[in-house]
Amino acid sequence: MKKPKKSQLLTIILTGLSGAGKTVALNAFEDSGFFCVDNLPSSLIETFVGLGNRTPSISKVAIGVDIRERSFLTDFTETVTAIRDKHKIEIIFMEAADDVLVRRFKESRRPHPLGYKDLKRALHKEAKLLQSIRQESDEIIDTTSLNPHELRKIITESYLKKGPKDMVINLMSFGYKYGIPLEADLLFDVRFLPNPYFIEELKDFPGTTPKVKNFVLSHKHTKDFLKKLKPLLDYSIPLYRKEGRSYLTIGIGCTGGKHRSPAIIEELKQFVLTKKQKVTVTHRDLTE
């Protein structure tokens, strides 16, 4: 028997760990024309998507589901399978490092949905309960080093454009003294380059300023490094795109993240733009 043709309704199911930014992401979808609903019972998801498909004014929906809806854990696989047979669906799972989630809960002063007094215990329990759902997801977004604005930007540029998804390259400078960015897919250490910090007239200026950038880029070691790095990116970026990635984060690190890594990132930005590739820049540890 011939399978029925899938509807053109795009359905995003947004889930993940509490505190990982699901509300911010859902708001980004809503602001971009998705019909959104949060914390919908699993038993109603298929019905809701079916109604959306029969409503001409609705072409895309986003549904937020998480640990608050307990039956979601047991009904998820069955519900998703039923929807996939009839509709275009993508599952996005959001997560972040434990220490970041703890900080966010403390800042918001909201209790964890599982109700444990020990917040870390609740986070570990939730991660364990959601492990199977994480494995079924089409996309995993780690928001450890993202602020709300950066998360909205990733959602908008990666998921909300018309037509086939194109990969967004996020170039990130950082300082090793503040830790390696966990979301980075590719990491490069440029601490071997001459450091403007030890030049009196340069130390107080960031690597994004022309005089510091020119100092860093003028050295032979920098030129040799870029001559090797650019062909590597030329080779690897198309392969990541072919893999179906929505975004690729490339981290460049120096000691404090103020001089050398921002200068290299700004140079790489121009290089990536010549490839007609979408690019965002984050100077994680730069305080101008």
Image (cartoon, helix red, strand yellow):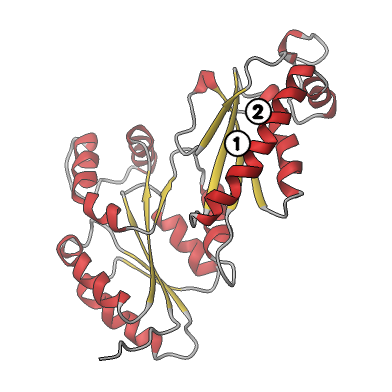
Q: Is residue 254 left or right of residue 272?
A: left
Q: Is residue 84 left or right of residue 260?
A: left
- Residues under numbered marks 2 and 1 in contact, where contact means CB atoms less than 8 Å apart: no
Alpha carbon distance from label 2 to label 1: 14 Å
Residue that numbered label 2 is attached to: 287
Give the image quarter of residue 72. Answer: bottom left
Label 2: how many Cα within 10 Å (few below 14, some 14–19, many 20+): few
Q: Is residue 157 left or right of residue 275?
A: left
Callout 2 amino acid: Thr
**Mark 2: secondary structure:** loop
Residue 87 position (above or below residue 184): below
Res 281 visible: no
Residue 261 position within the rendered picture, expressed as x and y whole percent measured from the top left: 66, 26
Nearest the eye: 234 or 267: 234
Q: Residue at x 32, y 35 (%)?
A: 98
Q: Which mark is residue 172?
A: 1
